[in-house]
Image: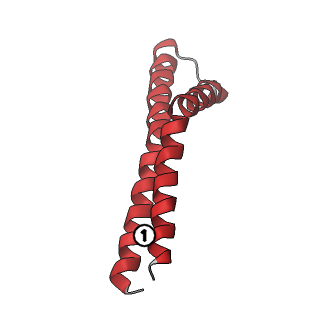
Amino acid sequence: MNPDMAIDICRKAIQVILMASAPMLLAGMIIGLLVSIFQAATQINEQTLTFVPKIVVVFVTMLIFGSWIIRIVSVFTVGLFDTMATL
């Protein structure tokens, strides 16, 4: 294995990680922003108010995008094993 091949595998792994985590991160960020706006508008400064909606939205997002995430990770894994088999 040459260094270029190792760099390419690492680049693809980082892309898969970002693609697989993006839906949950974006959903959590949007809900956090909405809760922050709600807290600023109502002047409720409860720190624990943001956790429950974020957890619920992240779990729902995982249910919605779960099959897509598994497909992306499995395609990457199969490609990685194919690459290792040709070495």
Is 83 situated above or below 35? below
State the scheme by which the image is colored: secondary structure
* Residue sticking out furthest to the bottom: 2
Viewer-proximal residue among 6 and 48: 6
Task: Name the residue: 44% across, 54% down.
Answer: 16
The quadrant of the image that shows the C terminus is bottom left
Q: Three-letter amino acid code at disc 1?
A: Cys
x and y, in percent, of residue 32 in the image: 50, 29
Residue topped by disc 1: 10
x and y, in percent, of residue 66 in the image: 55, 36
* Quadrant in the rendering for residue 26: top left
x and y, in percent, of residue 74 in the image: 52, 53
x and y, in percent, of residue 48 in the image: 66, 28
* Quadrant in the rendering for residue 86: bottom left
Is 20 situated above or below 66? below
Within 10 angstroms of label 1, few (less than 14), some, or many (20 or more) residues? few
Is 81 situated above or below 60? below
Is 31 situated above or below 17? above
Is residue 26 left or right of 58 when viewed as pictured?
Answer: left
Viewer-proximal residue among 72 and 55: 72
